[in-house]
Image: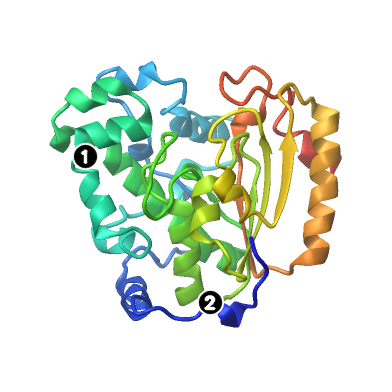
Amino acid sequence: MASSSASSAAATPAEPLRRNRVLSSKLYLDVPGSKAPVVYSPAYDIAFLGIEKLHPFDSSKWGRICKFLTKEGHLEKNRVVEPLEASKEDLLVVHSESYLNSLKSSLKVASIVEVPPVALIPNWLVQQKLLYPFRKQVGGSILSAKLALERGWAINIGGGFHHCSAEEGGGFCAYADISLCIQFAFVRLNISRVMIIDLDAHQGNGHEKDFANDGRVYTLDIYNAGIYPFDHVAKQYIDQKVELLSGTKTDDYLDQLDNALKVAQNRFQPQLIVYNAGTDILDGDPLGRLKKLSSWDHCVKA
């Protein structure tokens, strides 16, 4: 990302409309103190006539994560925050009308989620069974930023659709929830410095394009350079990238992560950090091709 000051993000003709949409949104719920800053809905999980199993992406992992947390005593079910679904007006804060209209084509959605049989499904069913869960997760990501500023931290058990930009979806990502989360935070939380730490095994090309040359956003992206999306245009907008080799193991991964975080801390002082946690860095994941043994290693090491 080219260096620029926050003031250089000059308002475009569309900026007042974007601001009005953010201010009129209902996604920033007032969450009582009795609730934990953990956002989830059973509607996140995608069950689509078994078709979802044709893609290696686990589209029911969000529910299993929540069940694990409650079973292990880390989270009480009645303390979980349920988000609202992102409306069309919410999505237009980042996405264009033409892009959202393109999702009315089942063929277009099939190409984004990389499941060809979806093209044969009536679009009303695609909207209900596939895109609705995505829109609920978008609502969760947006709400999580508000909770993080209020409580010091927050987790959305879902979202992280980092391959989707304002005008283009892909890689099982139909909506740009990270970009939306940050644009809402700029307006509603009155902040101007956001750091994205993207540790998914794949390059986060969607948000990188959306915040190209925007000095308000600093991106640290650590990813396997030998796998999808090979987006060389988006790479030029990454402030700090660490390109890993397939087969990178735990100790090497953690050393590179620790060094990268130290550099980022010295370069940028964020008011909000958006951390995209990718489980596909773990050994055995069919897509990430890395060899990290445990997602908890870094927490223990710290």
Residue 258 at x, y percent in the picture = 83, 46
Kindly identify which residue carries mark 1: 127
Query: How would you rate the neighbour count of disc 2 (Cα within 10 Å): few for under 14, some for 14-19, many for 20 or more?
Result: few
Sequence-first disc among 2 and 1: 2
Q: Amino acid at mark 1?
A: Gln
Which of the 4 image quarters holds residue 40?
top left
| Residue that appears at 17% across and 26% down | 121
Residue 45 at x, y percent in the picture = 37, 33
Would you say 17 lies left or right of 288 here? left
**Is label 2 in a helix, a strand or a loop?**
loop
| Residue that appears at 84% across and 31% down | 252
Locate the N terminus by quadrant. Answer: bottom right
Would you say 23 lies left or right of 108 here? right
The vertical placement of 298 against 12, above or below, is above
Q: Amino acid at mark 2?
A: Ala
Would you say 103 lies left or right of 267 here? left
Query: How would you rate the neighbour count of disc 1 (Cα within 10 Å): few for under 14, some for 14-19, many for 20 or more?
Result: some
| Residue that appears at 31% across and 26% down | 47
**Residue closest to the eye, 59 or 268:** 268
Tell me the distance, in whole angstroms, between the alpha carbons under discs 2 and 1.
34 Å
The vertical placement of 195 against 254, above or below, is below
**Is label 1 in a helix, a strand or a loop?**
helix
Q: Nearer the viewer, mark 2 or mark 1?
A: 2
Residue 130 at x, y percent in the picture = 29, 35
Kindly identify which residue carries mark 2: 9
Which of the 4 image quarters holds residue 191?
bottom right
